Image: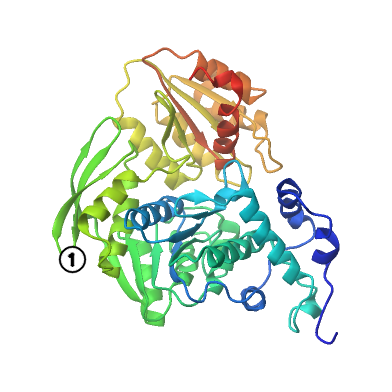
Amino acid sequence: MPGVHRSLGQVMTRQINSYEEAEAYINGIPKFTGKNSLEDTRLFLKHIGDPLKNRKIIHVAGTNGKGSVCAYLCSVLREAHISAGMFTSPHLVTMRERMAVDGHMATKEEFMDAFAYVTERLSFLPPGLAERSYHPSFFEFLFFMAAVYFEKAGVEYVVLETGLGGCLDATNAIDHKMLCILTSIGYDHMEYLGDTLPEIASQKAGIMRRGVPAIYPVRQKGVAQKIEECAAAIGAKTVPVNPEAIKDIKIKNKTIDFSLRINYYGYIGFTVSTCAVYQIENAALAIKAFDWLADERITLPVLREGIRKMAWAGRMEEILPHVYLDGAHNTDGIGRFLDTVRIQPCTGKRRLLFSVVKDKQYQDVIGMLALSGLFDVIGVVQLQNARALPLHVLRDTFGQYTGSACKAYDDLDKAFDELVDKRDDEDRVYIVGSLYLAGEIKALLRRPRHDQF
């Protein structure tokens, strides 16, 4: 048949009949496929029927806080009984977490339906992709599956989180957007995004579009200036969230109250159900988004309740009494994590368990943790991941600051047993670092040995 190419995908996916096989196939994609151009992503989106063309798109980019902002947005939409799909990354335990509708991740059956559709379309490629033997990257494949899943679910809104960067991210193949949101910018993925915060911000700002509002915090002045320059260059609308717009912060045991100035009402009180002070800014960005959208279904009571109800795994999540799990893994994230630890009262010992991948700024991050003086007991464990920072490097890097105070654990079970299971009632335990660590902890907690908690 002219213009049709029988691809690698047809051969490799012919015998895939279960969720586990599909997940293994997607995990194997990086072994034979690299990054594709944004134009190729657009071509394949069109090839699968452009499933997001009739959805209201809110696009979120940034270094830290992207997932939380997406979760706040979808929590409010759910409270308003407005159907919404959410595409986020990475996942903690299962790939199905990356695509959710109305707060529920895709079932195995829904995941397989989307997988089957994408692989079927991959089995014959149109001109423009055929000659290049195109195959989606790992991230693209899941993005395409989410798009198909959201179309079939008939959602009204789609909240998209970028994977890496913004300008060249696969999600940026979508041009019709209602809103863009840029969260906190920090040093991460510098080999791709640049060496300075303004350079990184410029890449993240690539999600903006002419005439589309872009909401962003004005906490980092050089970053805000770069975002405003990028917006002016393309004619995007800027919606800054200034520090003075947030006041009356009251930190409680498990919640934080604050007031935010919004256009129609002035200063209005909100509550976030977390002890993480950094979530105030993330919630404020989501609130500003709805303030700008002015959807009459999202009333003030709905907005308040949606913000209050939001829960997001692995972000200062209290997984057991006085045991907190946080995915901070770069200098900006660790700084904000430490801000929260400082304000939490502790009459016992503060215990830390840390791990990270080797391509992060682990020296700077470990230095911040060690020099904070906040932790009485420090443990490190190596991740079960090809990108893991070796255990001896973790131990030796902490040792530069803390001497013998850092203990290296050969496996996560042993670390959890000593730092968590054997803690005193007055102690607080913080498990922080890579989201891969958060995923391993989540998997560990599902085992029967922890049923007593």
Q: Is residue 407 visible?
A: no
Q: Using residue 439 as the reference point, say whether residue 319 is left or right of it.
A: left
Q: Position of residue 307 (x, y in %)?
A: 30, 49
Q: Using residue 348 as the reference point, say whether residue 51 is left or right of it.
A: right
Circle 1 is placed at which residue position? 263
Who is closer to the viewer here, 192 or 215? 215
Quarter placement of the N terminus: bottom right
Q: Position of residue 71 (x, y in %)?
A: 41, 52
SS state under label 1? loop
Decide: is 121 above or below 286: below
Q: Residue furthest bottom?
A: 2
The residue shown at (38%, 62%) is 223
Q: Quadrant of residue 127?
A: bottom right
Local crowd size for mark 1, using a 10 Å CA cut-off: few (<14), some (14–19), many (≥20): few
The residue shown at (53%, 63%) is 150
Decide: is 10 above or below 394: below
Q: Is residue 162 visible?
A: yes
The residue shown at (26%, 39%) is 256
Q: Quadrant of residue 183?
A: bottom left
Who is closer to the viewer here, 429 or 290? 290
Q: Position of residue 180 (x, y in %)?
A: 40, 68
